[in-house]
Image (cartoon, rainbow, N blue to C red):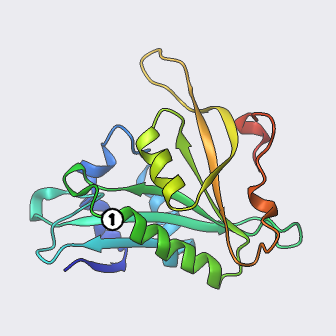
Amino acid sequence: MTTLRAFTCDDLFRFNNINLDPLTETYGIPFYLQYLAHWPEYFIVAEAPGGELMGYSGAVLMLCMFTVMGKAEGSVAREEWHGHVTALSVAPEFRRLGLAAKLMELLEEISEKKGGFFVDLFVRVSNQVAVNMYKQLGYSVYRTVLEYYSASSGEPDEDAYDMRKALSRDTEKKSVIPLPHPVRPEDIE
């Protein structure tokens, strides 16, 4: 049985094989510690019975973990208070088991409790598997962000979709009305 638990500092040393997945954005340890300190309720891990990491893992101890990392941000007055999915990654051998959907559901529940209007995330336009999964979970493309993801080895930067799902506080679903034109990263608040 998979156990859902809070992410701990020790997990930072156990998730390398997931963090090195080509579709996962990687960050420095201070970035993860900042999230852990400011938004611990948004940093969730799924761990298999044997402790095997299912996502963000370091397989040395055969630990199984899947992680979702997010935060709350925005303005309540402008109806922009929302949950933001910063990272969602599952080890390749544990994909297609419903883990991503379960952790997204938990992040949405946390965002509801915090009075959010919506949950948003950014995903590479080329990552159609993830785009389709998010659409199945009720997310829609709110806008395209040009050259959001930096490329390596001389390739062009990649665009992102800003995908959103309205929460119950957004009764008129204003937060998910798509923008008619793309934006640049510097235009994002």
- Residue 82 placement: quadrant: bottom right
- Residue 94 placement: quadrant: bottom left
Horizontal side of residue 183 vs 154, given as left or right: right
Which residue is the extreme one toward the top? 154
Horizontal side of residue 96 vs 165, given as left or right: left
Q: Which amino acid, by three-letter code, is at mark 1?
A: Gly
- The answer to whether residue 99 of the structure is visible from this angle is yes
Count all numbered tags in the image, as a single digit.
1
Label 1 element class: loop
- The answer to whether residue 31 of the structure is visible from this angle is no
Residue 85 placed where, x, y %? 54, 60
Q: Residues within 10 Å of mark 1 (few under 14, many from 20)?
A: few
- Residue 108 placement: quadrant: bottom right
Residue 153 placed where, x, y %? 42, 18
Residue at the image position 75 percent from the left and 38 percent from the top = 186
Horizontal side of residue 60 vs 97, given as left or right: left
Which residue is the extreme one toward the bottom? 113
In the picture shown, does residue 65 fall above or below 16? below
Residue at the image position 79 percent from the left and 75 percent from the top = 171
> What residue is pinned by disc 1?
98
In the picture shown, does residue 110 fall above or below 66? below
Which residue is the extreme one toward the front? 136
Q: Using the image as rendered, state which of residue 188 and residue 130 is in the foreground.
A: 130
